[in-house]
Image (cartoon, grey):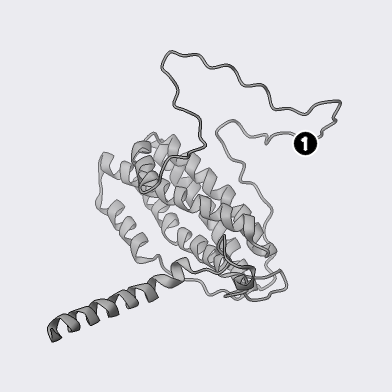
Amino acid sequence: MSRVNGTAFVIAALVTTVGALAFPVWSYADRSGTPEANLAAGTVSTQWGPLTAADRDLIVRVRLAGLWELPAGQQAMERAPSEAIKEAADHLIVGHTDLDKRVRIVAAQLGVELPNQPNEQQQGWLQEMTNATGADYEYKFANLLRSAHGKIFPAIGAVRNQTRNTLVRQLASDANQTVLDHITVLEKTGRVDFDAIANDSVAGSTASPSGPPAPVPGQVVPSAPAAEASGNVSTTSRPSPAEPGTVNTGRPDPVDSQGVLQ
């Protein structure tokens, strides 16, 4: 009996430890559905607005992205297995050089400490690419990077939607532009395995109950009416001028009030 009790105690202790380790990951008080009284948990005041745990997480994730994706781009440029891979590598280097400059300025202004090396998982991805050759290298380059960009894309949107901090909101906008550009050029390589990405994305999820029914082969569906303004409405804005399938990443330089770039 004492042995059983001892085993139960160890298991209980392990469960408690794992729960304590996992807690910071899911316990952001500013996540959807938490009581308003808990919104201030982990939040600090700044002159640019409240800075939440989710805001700080995005800042660190933007920095980490550059710490492994820029070297990945440089490696691909040096290997240059194809023009398509070289183009994607070029965008990774330029995009993350710019984004890293912006995130370092924002972090300095908000007092957020940044990592200086990729995390263990990102180092593993870099090693996978380093060890690969030929077609396998192109596949790993395109898919590891495309998957990583695809996973941070919705996280950027979520923070952009909920943040009350103007610096974080602008950083999210800049990151969104850069990530979409990188997704676009990585897909242009023709090496992205969309089946693998889709299977990974839907693992553990269920179909939306409100979605349309599956189409019937050979059956023609009626054309949807145009979504347009009614009446005599005068507009002045226009869609982005870039060619279809491209992203305009031009933007003004950030204001470096802390002298980070000097």
Q: Position of residue 48 (x, y in %)?
A: 71, 69
Q: Amino acid at mark 1?
A: Ser
Q: Quadrant of the C terminus?
A: bottom right
* Residue 142 appears in the picture as rendered: no
* Residue found 62% across the figure and 67% down from its top: 106
Q: Answer above or below: position of 257 versus 81.
A: below
Name the residue tied to disc 1: 237
Choose between 40 and 239: the one closer to the eye.
40
How many residues crowd around disc 1 within 10 Å: few (fewer than 14), some, or many (20 or more)? few
Quick check: 70 above or below 189?
below
Q: Is residue 150 visible?
A: yes
Query: Closer to the camera, 66 or 154?
Result: 154
- The kind of secondary structure element at disc 1 is loop
Instruction: Please give left or right for residue 90 compared with residue 56 in the image.
Output: left
- Left or right of 8: which side holds 49? right
Q: Does residue 144 lie above or below 23 as drawn?
A: above
Considering every residue shown, the one lying at the far bottom of the view is 2
Query: At which x and y percent is residue 115?
Result: 46, 71
Picture coordinates of residue 261 (x, y %)? 61, 68
Examine the rendered structure and indicate whether residue 16 appears above or below residue 232. below
At 58% from the left edge and 64% from the top edge, which residue is drawn?
A: 103
